[in-house]
Image (cartoon, grey):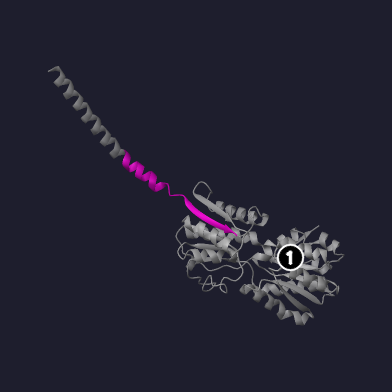
């Protein structure tokens, strides 16, 4: 009898505990649902940089991207995870790195230069891509047009063909006796051909003979440079390409070795010891790219965002290098410089 009463009391207590648990769960469920709704999932961004890991220029660009995203409320490790992959190998290595990033299924991809953008587009036709510092996205087939990109990619170009001729013009103003110029270009890309054409268009009017040479052949570059340097009236132009950027120290060293006045497409060459550079402020494009990343993460489509051209160009002169070349830079040229390194 007593045992039956104890059993009955135990069952009653268990029923009460079960009812209490159900009530507590029912009360807690709306709060848990609200917490899930008010805490959006962390977004993921994959970035491909076709440079040696730790490259100063690459790091500066990534820092600018982080800064731009931070200003828009995207904090790495808090509401977004930014996965950066570096690749300094050949095309196969870049393609592998692109495939690895796509396999992570991020919400968005950032491709630095045409070298990274092409493999990215080969790896995915659905994930949104924001490219940075691509010379000619239309010519490369990355977008249908600058105004209406179409597809899954949009971004920021690295230069306008209209400024390319200024390299030769500035070089001629700096060295009035100039008669011959070696033009280093990448003949395997559309922009390599286009840039040489833009320089060629004004060469005759300036009385300059051009000698084009492929960017990938270091021995051929030195052979052509050493040959022209003997005349004492030669100069050097290095046109924009990803390959030239990775080999920038080689070009600076060759120009110094053969005492050739040279102009390059980006400030990094001048800070590495090159005489002059004129080109877009590449870090600015990373900050601007953050705005497109923000808009796409909030629901806009790359196809609807027009490709943007640079808004800032910098002319940099390295006077220390000018002194080593025994070159006096005219006051008229110094007057138009945005930055003078001494």
How far from the left and from the top, in percent, is residue 104? 48, 55
Q: Which residues are magenta?
A: 28-49
Q: Residue furthest left?
A: 1
Q: Residue furthest right?
A: 326
Occupied quadrant, residue 181:
bottom right
- Position of 147 with respect to 158 (left or right) is left
The residue under the point 26% across, 36% down is 23
Quadrant, the C terminus: bottom right
Out of 226 and 181, give the one closest to the viewer.
226
Vertical arrangement, residue 202 with respect to residue 1, above or below: below
How far from the left and from the top, in percent, is residue 139? 57, 74
Q: Exactly how many numbered labels are in the figure?
A: 1
The residue under the point 75% across, 58% down is 272
Vertical arrangement, residue 130 with respect to residue 166, above or below: above
The residue carrying mark 1 is 277
How far from the left and from the top, in percent, is residue 320? 82, 59
Residue 274 appears in the rendering: no
The verdict on residue 43 being magenta is yes
- Position of 297 with respect to 31 (left or right) is right
Occupied quadrant, residue 264:
bottom right
Residue 167 appears in the rendering: yes
The residue under the point 52% across, 63% down is 120
The residue under the point 59% across, 52% down is 67
How far from the left and from the top, in percent, is residue 163? 68, 72
Instruction: Count residues near mark 1 (Cα–Cα under 10 Å), then give few for <14, some for 14-19, many for 20+.
Output: many
Local SS, label 1: strand
- Position of 5 with respect to 44 (left or right) is left
Quadrant, the N terminus: top left
């Amino acid at each position: 009898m007593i045992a039956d009463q104890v059993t009955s009391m135990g069952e009653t207590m268990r029923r009460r505990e079960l009812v209490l648990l159900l009530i507590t769960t029912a009360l807690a469920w709306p709060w848990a649902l609200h917490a899930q709704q008010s805490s959006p999932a962390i977004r993921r961004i994959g970035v491909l940089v076709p440079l040696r890991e730790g490259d100063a220029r690459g790091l500066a660009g990534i820092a600018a991207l982080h800064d731009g995203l931070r200003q828009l409320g995207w904090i790495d490790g808090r509401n977004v995870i930014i996965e950066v992959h570096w690749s300094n190998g050949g095309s196969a290595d870049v393609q592998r790195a692109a495939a690895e990033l796509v396999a992570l299924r991020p919400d968005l991809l950032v491709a630095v230069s045409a070298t990274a953008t092409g493999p990215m587009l080969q790896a995915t036709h659905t994930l949104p891509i924001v490219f940075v510092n691509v010379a000619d996205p239309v010519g490369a087939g990355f977008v249908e047009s600058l105004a209406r990109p179409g597809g899954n990619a949009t971004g920021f170009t690295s230069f306008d063909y209209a400024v390319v001729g200024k390299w030769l013009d500035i070089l001629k103003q700096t060295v009035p006796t100039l008669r011959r110029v070696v033009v280093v270009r990448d003949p395997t890309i559309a922009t390599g051909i286009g840039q040489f054409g833009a320089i060629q268009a004004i060469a005759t009017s300036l009385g300059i003979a051009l000698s084009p040479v492929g960017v990938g052949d270091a021995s051929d570059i030195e052979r052509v440079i050493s040959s022209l340097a003997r005349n004492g009236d030669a100069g050097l132009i290095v046109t924009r390409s990803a390959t030239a950027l990775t080999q920038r120290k080689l070009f600076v060293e060759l120009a110094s070795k053969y005492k050739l006045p040279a102009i390059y497409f980006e400030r990094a060459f001048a800070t590495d010891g090159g005489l002059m550079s004129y080109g877009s402020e590449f870090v600015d494009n990373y900050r601007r790219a953050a705005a497109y990343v923000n808009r796409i993460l909030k629901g806009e489509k790359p196809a609807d965002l027009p490709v943007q051209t640079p808004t800032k160009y910098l002319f940099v002169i390295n006077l220390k290098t000018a002194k080593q070349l025994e070159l006096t830079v005219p006051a008229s040229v110094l007057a138009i410089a945005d930055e003078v390194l001494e």
